Image (cartoon, coloured by chain):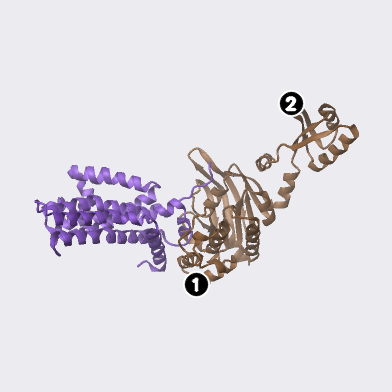
Amino acid sequence: MSERTSMSAIELRNVSRWYGNVVAINDITMTISQGVTGLLGPNGAGKSTLLHLIAGFLEPSRGELTVGGAASWRNPDIYRVLGLVPERDSVYAFLTGQEFVRATARLHKLPDPDAAAQRAIGIVEMTGAQDRRISTYSKGMRQRIKVAAALVHDPQVILLDEPFNGMDPRQRLHMMDLLDGLADQGRTILFSSHILEEVERLSGTIQVIVSGRLAASGDFRAIRRLMTSRPHVFLVRTSDDRRLGATLIGRPAVTGVEVTGRGLQVRASDYGAFSRELATLTRQEGIRLRELLPEDESLESVFAYLVES
Amino acid sequence: MFGVQGRVVASITLRATMGRKRVFLFAIPPLILVLVTVLLKLAHPPATDWPSHILGDFGFSVVLPLTALIIGTSVLGAEIDDGSVIHLLATPVRRSTVIMSKFVVAAFLTMIFVAVPELIAGLIATGGATKLAVGLFVGALVGSVIYNAVFVMISVLTTRAIAVGLLYLLVWEVVLGNFASGARILSVEQYSLGVANSIAHNTGLNAHLGLPTAVVMGAVVTVATLAFAIRRLGSFSLKGDAV
């Protein structure tokens, strides 16, 4: 198992990638080993760039990057241990699913390409549709046949770029179960997503990328706690904003209050405590609560907080 | 020829190329060539050297390069454009195998769509298996090989391969190749005509290079462009996030 684990590791040391003056990936150092790792970040953060670097489809401008101990750039042999499921939906649509996966098996020079193709198609539960042309497949089926092609040579490392895009909830669950199962077999699985819940459901460890930088790295639950315990900003509209503001400023869960034209802007250090106290205080003071709006609940603001902290 | 991997690449390429609607485009120039030949044969024009002008000038400066352009830029360029090439490149297949398999398919298809119609038109025009008909056929076979090496390379270098290829044909082959005598040594059309004329011995073909020069230069251009294409495909990069 130790040999398998060491073969699985993806290592990045001070990797940067820039296009002219634009830095897409900025000095990232990380190690990814066996299990499922989620690459989380907002759109345009650099997740795809990072996956393309790992997959050998981009040259690092600086730094060292290895998969299973070997550099991936200009090294087609890396695909003996690596399987890639790209984000783009373009497949050889004129082939049947079975032809596509078998062709991939033959490109890998597998000793029994038919058996390997059948095994991979079985894993993604596409046996029933394998003789149909890929052009007739739904988005989810295309995604699964792409996964089958990436799995056909039984790789230790699998990279998936936004694998849940365009899938319905049932297909998502199926794909999540599939990735879970592959990780249980000792593989290293790295997938990118901009949706927190996908990563939460699937991965124990995450790497958070924001603006090309590694903003957070490690156990998902710890990072999730960091996310929920960050200062929250709310807009509160009541029958008497000024009086409520004066009362709230004395509460330990509240770090700042500002009366604005739109209502009372409140900064709370503890989301749960503030929610409970607000209800109690308004009732005690006889103030009517008209509206309570979170002002910074976008994923971008969560990511921005992680970068600052 | 290139093992199992080469056969898979060639088979997928052949199905992709022949399956697209552009296959009808391949057939249009040679159909026009054969049709014009038949009409002229029926019309009995006063100039008796019309076969060398039609099949040499029109065939080698329009039909051959245009058909090779459409085929040569589509065998790999279409997959690069739609992104499906990633499924091919994310396997341990040597990039040389990819380029050579694509090139062989492109050259073969161009031979079918140009060299064979040249032979048919030559047989019709000259009334049999004359030196001119055979020379045009062999010259077109050679042109199919060299042009496709150039166009496969262009399709690796740019996503606007057809536009760049057209520009190359117009500026280099037509203008410089015909009007600047020094540039003829770097003209694929002249290599093809040189080979054709070495068999046909026909002044109407306007061949300006001898057989040794045409063969050596044709081989150099073919090897150099394919080597460059292999090198560039080895550095194939995907676009990252919008930055």
Query: Is A155 located above or below residue A242 in the figure?
Result: below
Q: Residue at x 34, y 45 (%)?
A: B164
Q: Which residue is mark 1?
A: A114
Q: Is residue A109 visible?
A: yes
Which mark lies nearer to you, 2 or 1? 2
- Three-letter code for the amino acid on which mark 1 is drawn: Asp
Q: Position of residue A78 (x, y in %)?
A: 50, 60
- Chain A as rendered: colour: brown
- Quadrant of image for the C terminus of chain A: top right
Q: Are marks 2 and 1 in contact (CB under 8 Å)?
A: no
SS type, badge 1: helix
Name the residue at the front extreme. B43
Q: Which residue is mark 2?
A: A261
Label 1 marks a residue whose chain is: A
SS type, badge 2: loop
Spatial CA distance of label 2 from label 1 is 69 Å
Find residue A170 and report its image quarter: bottom right
Compared across the picture, whether B131 is left or right of B165 comes to: left
Q: Residue at x 67, y 56 (%)?
A: A202
Q: Earlier in the sequence, mark 2 or mark 1?
A: 1
Which chain is depicted purple? B
Q: Is residue B220 visible?
A: no
**Considering depth in this image, is A242 or A116 the residue closer to the camera?**
A242
- Three-letter code for the amino acid on which mark 2 is drawn: Gly
- Quadrant of image for the N terminus of chain A: bottom right
Residue A219: numbered disc = none
Q: Residue at x 26, y 58 (%)?
A: B114
